[in-house]
Image (cartoon, grey):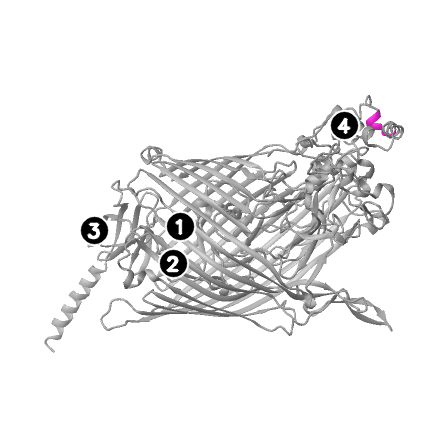
Amino acid sequence: MKYIKYIIVLLLFTMQDVAWAQQRITVTGTVYDASSGKRDPLSSVTILSNGLSIGSTDNNGKFSINVPNNATLVFRTIGYDSKSVKVDNKTSLTVGLTSSSEKIAEVTVTSGYQTKSRTLNTGSAVTISGKDIQGQPAGDVMSLLQGKVAGLNIQNNTGAPGFRGSVTIRGISNINVTGNGNNAFLTPTSPLYVIDGVPVDDNADYSYGFQQAGPGVSPASQIPPEDIEDITVLKDAAATSLYGSRGAYGVILITTKRGNSKVPVVRYNGSAFMSAVPQLRSVIGGKEERLMRIRQILMNDTSAIHALDLVNNTPFLSDSLNAYYNNSTDWQSYFYKPTYNHNHNLNVSGGDVQFNYKVVLGAYDEKGIQENTGYSRYNLNMNMIYNPVQKFKIEALLNNSIQKQRMGSGNGLLNNGVATGGASSSLLPAPSLYSSVNSVLGALTTDDDNKVLNTNATVNIFYDLFRNFKAGVYNSYTTVSSTKDNFSPAALNSNQAKYYTYNDRATTLYNRAQLSYVFGFREKPGDEELAHNFNLFAFSELRASFFKSDAMLNDKVVNDQLRGPLTLMTSYLSSKGGTIGYTDLRTVAFAGNFSYNYKSKYVLDFNYRVDGLSTNGPNAGYKKNPSISLKWNFDRESFLDAWTWLDYGDFRVSYGSNISPNGNIYQAYGKLYAGGRYNNQNTVISDLGTLPNLSLEPTKATTYNFGMDFSIFQNRLSVMFDSYYKQNDHIFKEKQLSSSNSFNVIGSTEISNVNYGWEFQATARPLSPSSPFKWNLSGNFAINREILAKLPDGLREFIQIDNSLGQSLYYRLGTNSLSNYLFNTKGVYTSLDQIPVDPVTGLPVRVGGNGLLNYFKPGDPIYTDLDGNYIIDNYDQVIAGNSQPQITGGLMSLLQYKQWSLEVNTSFTLKRDILNNSLAAQFGLFGKPTEMGGLVPISQYNFWQNVGDDAVYPNPFDFVRSAILNPFRTNQTLFQEDGSYFKLNSVKVYYNVPQTLSQRYGMNRLSINFTAANLGYITRYSGPNPESVSALGRDMSGGYPLPKQFTLGLNVEF
């Protein structure tokens, strides 16, 4: 017992030593590049202690952390070897990192809600840094990814501010077309967006009220490009299968920035940019228009007397002294004007490993080049991470945005008011209340106001139950409120004003609870490295979404000042109002992942997910989505150790499936509504419009993928290659029922199509690391083939008739799904002896009846007489063309010298057919010389004028027969052109002000940039822009042109 007191004293001294050893101190320092000899500071270097990230360096390479005085710090960043440094009571450290050949191998990729190193990732995924999309303001960030990812096809087919173009991954996955003619649109199959871990569907909640689109913006539109850390595109089933429902069309992950500096950092990004009007069509104006019309009538009418009578009876041709018809109005100048716009973002961030935060305040305002159009966005985004102890972490995000769209008299994709007004005759006076062209005033004075309020709140909690066993819960709530108000004054509507109002509300509640466990075994006792590594991951997912929309149309309001209420019985009967859309959906899913790797050399991934959707029919049940993938990192094989030039290399192979919901709950279960009273009792009546489909099931995408990646010569050249086969089954389409049935249609899922192709992506650094210049070259291309594999009821083909322009679609198994059905134009008849004659009747080939004007003559188009009956009719149409691009890609170059950088981005689309409806309409205007439509010069085209002319286009001046013959019909191969193009997307110039200069004024960093975007195209297409066409490849005169933009930007950091 006498030794007890000595033992106690000894223990107290020991505990004192332990306490002293664990004393925490603040360590500051700088991390620099030890490879270049210039000791350039390295930013975003991750600092770890005991395997836990505790901070990172700022843009000046500086850091400040609080650690135990005997801690061992690990400094790690992409492209450099990791370095361990012992603190040993030092409060200041200077750390040099040497470049490594493992740059891309250390890149982490997020897929299936997990983050893995590139070595262990078995899926096809491409990550784009947020730095690659800086310097160019955009209402929709996805437009900035054009040409950057192989297989990601982005077509910016509208220049309307705030609207996105079409976005598809690995071809189209739906063949449904709604509408007719120029108003025909392909059902969108945009990928699933996952923003900071929360899935957001871009294909849902887009409604139409009384044939007018409700306001709707892409989920990516609410995030300013300056706030994006990186964007990852997941393409094959191995990468997307765990996303289950809504993942069939691919997945795009968007991660926003986080605070990573102990000292608060304030960043300002501002820019002023001008949107310039692209080249518009030339027009024939004033006196020349009148004389051309008169000459056309005199030279092409049936007789001189009839021609003179026709001219004299047409006031705007004969009465040249009338001030109303004696004008030379440039209608396009009233619609299109350059605009000056601005964009501002203020970012305040800071914190360390225990607590960090970020607040972003943004304002974006862009006026459209079409009058009375534009887009404004105001956003306040905040996130916070609190990590009080190593085992517990909580994340909170709050994103708010208010967006306002102005669409004039259009809907963002089309503006028919502008199209009609812009095509008016130049002889008419300028627009006014007394002008006959009210479409101009309608486009300019229509009061159109559309607002979208989007709020998302997310709370994520993570807890380490025990070593390598982690639990996490994601909770998110999103609410979107949209309003649309459109008022058209009385002067534009026969002295009766019209008012349309629309509002909707959508809410989404999302929950995901997950567990993960990582463990491994050594191959031999005493080995430092674990040979057999396992990763188990499981989660459950719940999603509840609600959507309700209401609309009201006051056809005749009291006056322009008082927009309601209704007063007259006639206006009451012609007005409409009420709920036009209502959905309440639920999805539940359970999923798991098993991963195994042997020394990171051989990797196996197995995913399995089960989904239940409320839109499924009762007989459809739960849907199962498995995937399996393998990877061989052959660079880790010992027999390749002699290949010192090989940085890394691997082969990947995968199989898996995903689904995407179809239809709605009414198409699966039917709809009931209150009927009249029968026998003094209330009745309930079935909606006979749609027959319930008890087996309605989601679209299923099954993908096979083979890939290879490698990098050589210390990352001087890196390559990614993929080959894939993707089959989409159970594509939804409403099917007409027999007239003997009580119901009209049924929602069918009997269509399938297949996409297969090859993708290639490469990055090269051709200059020596010691060169003062740094040059990065990257390029990619994708070849995609799409064929129709299955049709309803076992059909092998059917035609979807277009009753507007006659541009029908021909669906035939074994061919591309969206084939055009057109008359085959083989040229123009040069002379009378070239026209075929029916040997039975002795009459030449004709159109329609037996009238004298129905027979073809020189100057008329040569159509293929498919059935050989010497009559050109709808039975002579052929399958022609493909509206979907078969090859897409892009080229990028980044050249850096000291403080200067020059970046050039391009993209290309090849082997795509476009129907030039705009050109057909321009030629067609000459067939109506007595109607007051605008005329455009056609002298640049090779059209028939005299006997013997070898022309491309028929005689446009034969107005007598034009209505019968219709030589410039839109549904002919004459106007189907090659829509291939090479586009100069943007040119960016950056200048980073030397820190010695910026720090004089209290700024850590100051940079200036200039960007020119949408600069031009190299194409054989005769239209103004091969990209500004619909998803069906139709170039309409009512489209919104893509403006050129010139930006001057400023970036400041304090």
Q: Earlier in the sequence, mark 1 or mark 4?
A: 1
Q: The residue tagged with tag 4: helix, strand or loop?
A: helix
Residue type indicated by callout 1 = Gly
Q: Is residue 254 visible?
A: no
The image position of residue 468, as x and y in percent, is: 35, 68
The image position of residue 618, as x and y in percent, is: 65, 73
- In the image, taking residue 52 as reference, residue 227 lies left or right, namely right
The image position of residue 858, as x and y in percent, is: 77, 38
Mark 4 and mark 2: Cα distance apart in space: 68 Å
Q: Quadrant of residue 1006?
A: top left
- In the image, taking residue 455 as reference, residue 861 lies left or right, namely right
Query: Which disc is residue 118 wearing?
Result: 2
Q: Is residue 446 above or below residue 118?
A: above
Q: State the count of labels.
A: 4
Secondary structure, magenta segment, majority class: helix
Query: Which disc is residue 259 wearing?
Result: 1
Q: Which residues are magenta?
A: 313-318
- In the image, taking residue 713 as reference, residue 478 lies left or right, namely right
Q: Earlier in the sequence, mark 4 or mark 3?
A: 3
Mark 1 and mark 2: Cα distance apart in space: 24 Å
Q: Earlier in the sequence, mark 1 or mark 2?
A: 2
Report if residue 214 lies within the magenta region.
no
Q: Quadrant of the C terminus?
A: top left
Of residues 87 and 715, which is closer to you in this image? 715
Q: The residue tagged with tag 1: helix, strand or loop?
A: loop
Mark 4 and mark 3: Cα distance apart in space: 90 Å
Quickly name the residue at label 3: 90
Find out whether the residues at labels 1 and 4 contact each other: C-beta distance under 8 Å: no
Query: Which disc is residue 292 wearing?
Result: 4
Mark 1, mark 2: which one is toward the viewer?
Answer: 2
